[in-house]
Image (tube, rainbow, N blue to C red):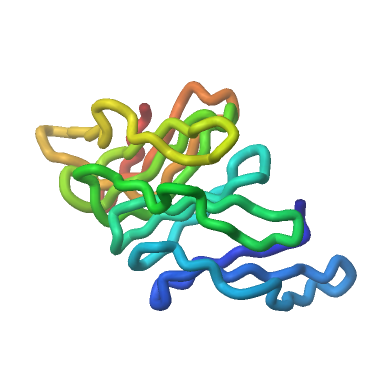
Amino acid sequence: NNKFLYAANVASGTVSVFKIDSVTGKLTSAGPDANSGAAAPNGLFFHPSGRYLYVTNQGGNSVSAFSVAGDGTLTSVSGSPFSAGTASLLNGIVVHPSGNFVYVASMGGTGGVVGYSVVSGTGALNLLAGSPYSNTNGGINNTGDGITIHPNGQWLYMGLVNQKRVAAY
């Protein structure tokens, strides 16, 4: 809604909320920091409805989910943080335009994309069968960094660490 700014605090394991002054752009704290429930939160992405904020936890190998109140404050969704299975070092995150899926780039282990379905009405996450989805190039597992999805929702792209390439799913 362009009224708030959110920042992941890697060192403290929290997410800060700031109110944006619509005239000056000045930021002021909008309340206490929300605990991510895991180590090293870093990537943030909103659900298309604006009702949920998803945060990758690089040190916790999980994704935290928060419901967003009208005043911008965050409340942990029941069951959060949600495990990434065998994936580790999570960073980039994107929500499918439909709001039904969340995808996360993994730099650790076998790398690839971690996929979740979103539970309608709660924002909770369920790990998709077969996740993480590895991308092998020349027999080498490619670890992921930045991730995005085409606006039509049909194609997902992930930058490959130290490859100077992009994987397409």
* Residue at 58% over, 23% down: 152
Residue 86 in percent (x, y) is at 19, 44
Residue 93 in view, yes or no: yes
Please state the horizontal and vertical placement of residue 155, each as a whole percent of the image: 46, 26
Instruction: Determine the residue positioned at 36% across, 67% down.
Output: 40
Residue at screen point 82% across, 71% down: 21
Can residue 164 be seen in the rendering of this structure?
A: no
Question: Given the current orientation, which residue lies at the most extreme right position?
Answer: 23
Residue under the image location 52 percent in, 29 percent down? 100
Q: Where in the figure is residue 109, as x and y percent of width and height?
A: 16, 49
Nearest the camera: 32 or 148? 32
Give the farthest residue toward the front: 78
Count every numbered label the image shows and give the total: 0
Quarter of the figure with residue 24: bottom right
Task: Determine whether 92 is above or below 152 in the image.
Answer: below
Measured as percent of width and height from the top left, residue 150 is found at 53, 30
Q: Quadrant of the C terminus?
A: top left
The residue lying toward the viewer, choosing from 11 and 25, is 11
Report whether 7 appears left or right of 102.
Answer: right
